[in-house]
Image (cartoon, grey):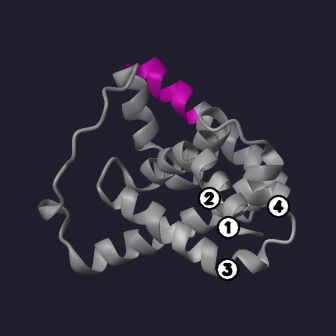
Amino acid sequence: MDKDFFVQAIEAHSGSMYRVACAVLGPRDECRDALQETALKAWEKRHTLRDESKFKSWIIRILVNECRNIQRARRRVIPVEQIPDSPAPPPPDPALAMALRALPEKYRLPLTLQCSEGMSYREIASALRLTEGAVRGRIHRAKEMLRKELEVQ
């Protein structure tokens, strides 16, 4: 993979990557840190990508791992009370946004990747290192959980 392809691919997927980082970390400054670290790690490990057509799922997998590293570091170093909230753009439907944030990450992330990022079950499975069946099940369960939560309100 050459430098031009790498830069173009990162730029093409930066919006998706930011939304995925926000889905995992929440709307914080840490999302930008995760994106930078992901780009750096991906550049260093670019030789491990055998098929450039799978760049998006490969980079999302690196990003999710980096977000989880940040979450672990956050739990060890910074008390939750000291984490400042950064302003986020208002969601189109506040009830839906709250219900989505309430979902456990294992359900929220596959649903976000499918609905917001338009990734296929195969791409999501590759990015999250799950089987396609597990992805389908988690997305179905997430939709059911959202449906129940929104019916209550």
Left or right of 153? Residue 136 is right
User: Is label 4 in contact with label 3 (beta carbons under 8 Å)?
Assistant: no
Which residue was labeled with disc 2? Answer: 7
Which residue was labeled with disc 1? Answer: 3
Q: Earlier in the sequence, mark 3 or mark 2?
A: 2
Left or right of 2? Residue 93 is left
SS class, disc 1: helix
Residue 52: image tag? 4
Q: Which residues are magenta?
A: 145-153
Mark 1, Cα crowd under 10 Å, few <14 / some 14-19 / many 20+, is few
Pick the front one: 138 or 128: 128
Percent of width and height locating residue 62:
61, 68
Mark 3, Cα crowd under 10 Å, few <14 / some 14-19 / many 20+, is few
- Residues under labels 3 and 1: Cα distance? 13 Å
SS class, disc 2: helix
Image quarter for residue 102?
A: top left
Q: Is residue 99 above or below residue 109?
A: above
Q: In the image, what residue occupies the spot 63% across and 45% down?
A: 12
- Residues under labels 2 and 1: Cα distance? 6 Å
Q: Earlier in the sequence, mark 2 or mark 4?
A: 2
User: The disc labelled 3 sits on which kind of residue?
Assistant: Lys
Left or right of 79? Residue 67 is right
Percent of width and height locating residue 38:
53, 68
User: The disc labelled 2 sits on which kind of residue?
Assistant: Val
User: Is label 2 in contact with label 1 (beta carbons under 8 Å)?
Assistant: yes
Residue 45: image tag? 3
